Amino acid sequence: MKKRRWGRLVALGITLAVLVPLGYLWATSLVPGEYDPARMGYADYGGGHAMAGHEHHGGASVADLTGPKTGTPDVDVTLVARQQKFQLASGETIDGYTLNGTSPGPLIRARVGDLVQVTLVNESVKDGATVHWHGIDVPNAEDGVAGVTQDAVPVGGKHVYRFTAEQAGTYWYHSHQVSSEEVKGGLFGTIVIAPATPGDVIAAIHTYDGKRTINGRTGTARVELPAGTTARVRVINTDNAILRVGLTGTPYKVVAVDGREVHGPTAVTAAYALPAGGRADLEAVVPAGGMRLVAGTPTLSLGIGPADPPTAELPGETVDLLTYGTPAPLGFDPGTADRNFEYRIGRRPGFLDGMPGLWWTINGHKFPDVPMFMVAEGDVVRMKISNTSGQAHPMHLHGHHAVVLSRNGVAATGSPWWVDTLEVGNKETYEIAFVADNPGLWMDHCHNLPHASEGLMTHLMYEGITTPYRVGGNSHNEPE
């Protein structure tokens, strides 16, 4: 009898030894039903001076960091968001989301200096919607992130965005509410800040229900352009994974990346590796036999020119922006950085919001106990991004463009490589730098959007900034 009782006690002890730590890990993984994104995680000052700690007393509100409140807009667009079945340009039926009845939504075009006003009307997107201006460094209140810079627009509601178009380039817009679902389902469009020219070609690449498209069309399509025209092919990757793109039939130049001009581009025939969320402008003179934009494989391509060129595979070589182009001044000195941060991406088993799984980590911490990168306006910031997670991550910083200084310890020697979305492969390390010149609370996350929903996101936070918005709660904000 004593042996039996002792055996039970031992079994109970072993059970408790297992269950108590698991219970603790489960309980500490829970994300509050409502929380202030400005108070999540822990403050990382990057070696800089902490102005007022992580509490941000007496600072400015995100809601006050708006674009121009007065003035007649030069570009005035209304976007009506719907959750519906619709047809792709190539005829397939998709159960997803549209803007003004189509996906992609309408092209918005502005010129540098234009006052842009966009009114989002949510007609039937049940989870709510926003518009984030991906790659456009707008004032913080116009950034369109649910729970951070605004509340998600509910069914029957509307929200007005106003900003000045200050930087020419190729950009896109998309919902930043339940992003992994709504963007995948079609709630996005393109925006170009530049005058329209005869050689402009837009190519938004997106996968709907396993069907990869260019401008909402599967297979091959054609753009008629006269031979001798200088074509600027604006390629936008709206999917969750990197994609090799390029022009076949003629050499071309990579003249812009993420809305920033490349200095001294040279003609290449290699493919270009376009990160998820990234953009590249490819320029070539249209040959008599035409040329073709290839998105991954020749089965998805866009013929450009007076004739339909033959399909062809992309070459195995890839343009390396670390050495492509020629150097030019940055406009600031990364060697005088006020803040030095590390953004170490990893992965480990555990619980996230009570769910067991294999979760992403930032500096060894799981969401929401992640570092908040704290800066002050005017700071020069350096950040080392390393990845040992086993998968690649397209890292997207809102509100800023950063320049790549090095990759795996090798210094950049080509054109200044400015990015807002940087592909960080497994076992890769990049060092980037930027000037903190746009006050606010800015998401810094993986643009493989399911990864963001699984915890690979944090914020760049300006000291003294607060937000009246909350994630979760009655507003049902889910920024991902």
Image: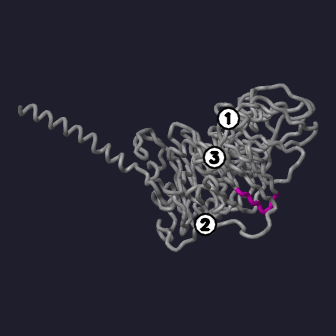
Indicate whether 176 appears above or below 115. above
Residue 173 visible in the snapshot: yes
Residue at the spot of label 2: 63
Of helix, strand and loop, which one carries label 1?
A: strand
State which quadrant residue 67 falls in: bottom right
CA gap, disc 2 to disc 3?
Answer: 28 Å
Q: Amino acid at mark 3?
A: Leu
How did the renderer colour the structure?
one colour
Residue at the spot of label 3: 422
Q: Amino acid at mark 2?
A: Ala
State which quadrant residue 223 falls in: top right
Label pair 1/3, CB-CB below 8 angstroms? no
Which mark is drawn over residue 94? 1
Mark 1 vs mark 3: give the one in front. Answer: 1
Of helix, strand and loop, which one carries label 2?
A: helix
Query: Farthest front residue?
Result: 156
Q: Residues within 10 Å of mark 1 (few under 14, many from 20)?
A: some
Q: Position of residue 450 (x, y in %)?
A: 55, 41
Q: Residues within 10 Å of mark 3 (few under 14, many from 20)?
A: many
Q: Is residue 275 left or right of residue 254?
A: left
Q: Along the polypeptide, which appears first: circle 2 or circle 3?
A: 2
Mark 2 vs mark 3: give the one in front. Answer: 2
Q: Along the polypeptide, which appears first: circle 1 or circle 3?
A: 1
Of helix, strand and loop, which one carries label 3?
A: strand
| Front-most of residues 286 and 236 | 236
Q: Along the polypeptide, which appears first: circle 1 or circle 2?
A: 2
Which residues fall within the magenta stretch? 111-119
